[in-house]
């Protein structure tokens, strides 16, 4: 373990950070995306510092595979853009750079100052940047060239202790950005980190701040939860801290109203987590099914609806509309919600006319095939019978012919014998 020093206002050396070596943090560069390493190499070659930061470092330390590799540097967005032709600057106020490698996008940001609080947009130093990070376990910087983890806030110890501790003071952290509450429960569930009592209490008391967050940001956060293999644990935490009512108000109301609905809903959320483990790339519509199927089941008496002739288009239209309102403020892609609604209706026994027609067609084909098979069998039996009859007739005719031939031979022999006797008598008289 190494120590990084700085100086105080009087120029005296002060300990700033703890530096962990590879033998201590156990991160292998083999687990880092080669394109992320290339970005850091090119920034370093251009004379800038660059680190992998945030959740990726946390995941690498605990042995999880990071989904994203965020990079932070002292280069400004315009300078980053000049180094990478395959990049674009995004954001109006908080500007950062997306570096594109095929289908992969790497977010490269510049160190920010905390002069305007944790959401300001002024450029700063790494020492200032770390104070803007939400929780200590996300405030670690990894240098892949030196293979060192730089820790300014005790994040490494908190990871080892499974402790979720905020960097920013509790009186500011959620006021400045309410979405941090959702991140807190997500980190707690996915890393099995204990949430201190005062932090949990603060989240419950501040839950109402989520009502100020735009639907687009809430949708983004909810989709992250839906794509997580720990979806059940995260949603369980969200219900416990009174946050879920702002993510899925309709579902939360039904959960509070009915223990039966709560049990079924949470069972399906557990299945959603299992799907994310077995099929991480499954389409969103397949995941949405688990969010809406229990609600769809409550809309009507589906057995009664499907007993008599019904209009699939009408039932689908009404169900889609109800489910669309049910998942608000989440705004999923329309075709994915359509897929989920159709799948839920299918499970409830509501078949589209095309699928019914297809089934009937298949049944008819199968029935005709079996009839044709039966006719074929009867035809073969008839043919065999006819063939057997002909064969028997031919055998009888052959037998008659042979009998006639034998009879003819005997008759001829008898005539010959009579002639011979006459000739002998005639010779004797003579």
Image: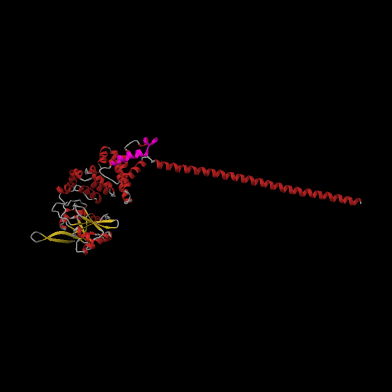
Residue at image point 85% right, 50% down: 421
Tell which of 392 and 313 is nearer to you.
Answer: 313
Magenta-drawn stretch, dominant element (helix, strand or loop): helix
| Residue 389 appearing in the image | yes
**Residue 291 locus on image (x, y percent):** 30, 43
Q: Residue furthest left?
A: 10
Residue at image point 52% right, 44% down: 372
Q: Residue furthest right?
A: 430
Q: Is residue 392 left or right of residue 183?
A: right
Residue at image point 29% right, 39% down: 261
Q: Is residue 306 left or right of residue 2?
A: right
**Residue 379 locus on image (x, y percent):** 57, 44
Q: Look at the image and give the residue range highlighted in magenta.
A: 304-324
**Residue 75 locus on image (x, y percent):** 19, 60
Quadrant where the N terminus lies? bottom left
| Residue 22 appearing in the image | no
């Amino acid at each position: 373990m190494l120590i990084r020093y700085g100086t105080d206002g009087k120029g005296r050396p002060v300990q700033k950070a703890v530096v962990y070596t590879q033998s201590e943090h156990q991160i292998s560069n083999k687990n880092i995306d080669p394109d992320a390493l290339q970005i850091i190499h090119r920034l370093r070659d251009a004379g800038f510092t660059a680190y992998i930061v945030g959740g990726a470092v946390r995941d690498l330390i605990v042995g999880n595979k990071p989904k994203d590799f965020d990079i932070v540097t002292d280069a400004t967005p315009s300078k980053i853009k000049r180094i990478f032709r395959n990049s674009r600057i995004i954001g109006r106020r908080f500007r950062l750079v997306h570096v594109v490698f095929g289908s992969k996008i790497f977010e490269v940001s510049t160190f920010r100052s905390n002069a305007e609080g944790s959401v300001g947009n002024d450029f700063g130093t790494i020492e200032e940047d770390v104070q803007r990070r939400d929780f200590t376990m996300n405030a670690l910087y990894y240098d892949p060239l030196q293979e060192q983890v730089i820790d300014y806030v005790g994040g490494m110890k908190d990871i080892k202790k499974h402790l979720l501790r905020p960097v920013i003071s509790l009186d500011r952290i959620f006021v400045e950005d309410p979405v941090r509450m959702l991140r807190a429960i997500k980190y707690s569930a996915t890393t099995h980190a204990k949430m201190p009592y005062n932090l949990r209490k603060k989240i419950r008391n501040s839950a109402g701040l989520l009502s100020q967050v735009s639907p687009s940001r809430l949708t983004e956060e909810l989709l992250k939860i839906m794509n997580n293999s720990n979806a059940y644990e995260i949603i369980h935490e969200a219900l416990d801290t009174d946050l879920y009512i702002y993510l899925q108000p309709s579902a939360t109301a039904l959960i509070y109203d009915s223990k039966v609905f709560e049990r079924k809903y949470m069972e399906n959320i557990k299945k959603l987590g299992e799907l994310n483990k077995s099929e991480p790339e499954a389409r969103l519509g397949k995941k949405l099914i688990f969010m809406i199927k229990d609600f769809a089941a409550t809309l009507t008496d589906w057995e009664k609806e499907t007993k008599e002739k019904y209009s699939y288009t009408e039932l689908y239209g009404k169900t889609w509309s109800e489910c669309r309102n049910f998942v608000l403020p989440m705004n999923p892609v329309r075709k994915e919600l359509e897929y989920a609604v159709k799948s839920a209706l299918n499970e409830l026994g509501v078949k589209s006319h095309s699928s019914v027609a297809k089934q009937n067609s298949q049944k008819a084909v199968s029935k005709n095939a079996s009839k044709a098979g039966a006719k074929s069998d009867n035809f073969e039996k008839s043919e065999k019978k006819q063939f057997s009859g002909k064969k028997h007739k031919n055998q009888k005719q052959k037998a008659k012919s042979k009998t006639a031939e034998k009879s003819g031979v005997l008759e001829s022999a008898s005539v010959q014998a009579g002639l011979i006797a006459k000739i002998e008598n005639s010779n004797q008289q003579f």
